[in-house]
Image: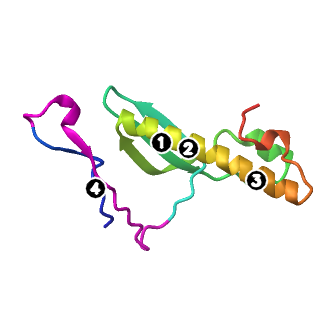
Amino acid sequence: MAKRTATRTPVASTQSTASLFKEVKIKRTNPDNVLPIFVNDVVVGHSLVEFIFNFSSIEPPLIIDPQDLQRLKSVDAVTRVKLVTTPKFAQDLLRALSINIENYKKSLEEELKARGKELPNNASGQSE
């Protein structure tokens, strides 16, 4: 099992509020037996004290002819992973995702430019 050390550890209850916590290094481990799970859908909810992320996999239906599309009423979204976390961590996650998406887009644009191609207008991650 992966070890995770808290980022903040109480020092002493007699000290001032500003010095109650100290930064502690996190030693991250990624065991080989943790399998990746592909997801392409997420539903996010929250309460006053937590955020809930339900990650799902949606398999596109097999459409052979136009009647198949007409008969299609819904597709299944099977929840693969449910994450429950604090509002603070949800904000940290949002910040980390934003930074990584920007870095991804820059890398992709550089790679395509090196190949003499351009990023399509709808491939930048923006909804139309």
Magenta stretch prevailing secondary structure: loop
- The residue at which mark 4 appears reads as 5
As measured in the structure, the alpha-carbon distance from the residue carrying label 1 to the one carrying label 4 is: 17 Å
Regarding mark 4 in the picture, which secondary structure is present there? loop
In the foreground, 83 or 18? 18
Q: How many marks?
A: 4
Whether 32 is among the magenta residues is yes
Q: Earlier in the sequence, mark 1 or mark 4?
A: 4
Going 33% across and 64% down the picture, which residue do you hit? Answer: 2
Q: Which mark is residue 93?
A: 1
Q: Is residue 34 left or right of residue 12?
A: right
Please tell me whether mark 1 or mark 4 is closer to you in this view. 4
- The residue at which mark 3 appears reads as 108
Q: Which mark is residue 97?
A: 2
Name the residue type under label 1.
Leu
Regarding mark 2 in the picture, which secondary structure is present there? helix
Going 32% across and 55% down the picture, which residue do you hit? Answer: 25
As measured in the structure, the alpha-carbon distance from the residue carrying label 3 to the one carrying label 2 is: 16 Å
The part of the chain drawn in magenta is: 13-35
Going 41% across and 47% down the picture, which residue do you hit? Answer: 82
As measured in the structure, the alpha-carbon distance from the residue carrying label 1 to the one carrying label 3 is: 22 Å
Q: Earlier in the sequence, mark 1 or mark 3?
A: 1
Q: Earlier in the sequence, mark 4 or mark 2?
A: 4
Where is residue 96 shown, x and y percent of the image?
A: 52, 44
Label 3 crowding class (10 Å Cα cut-off): few <14, some 14-19, many 20+? some
Name the residue type under label 2.
Leu
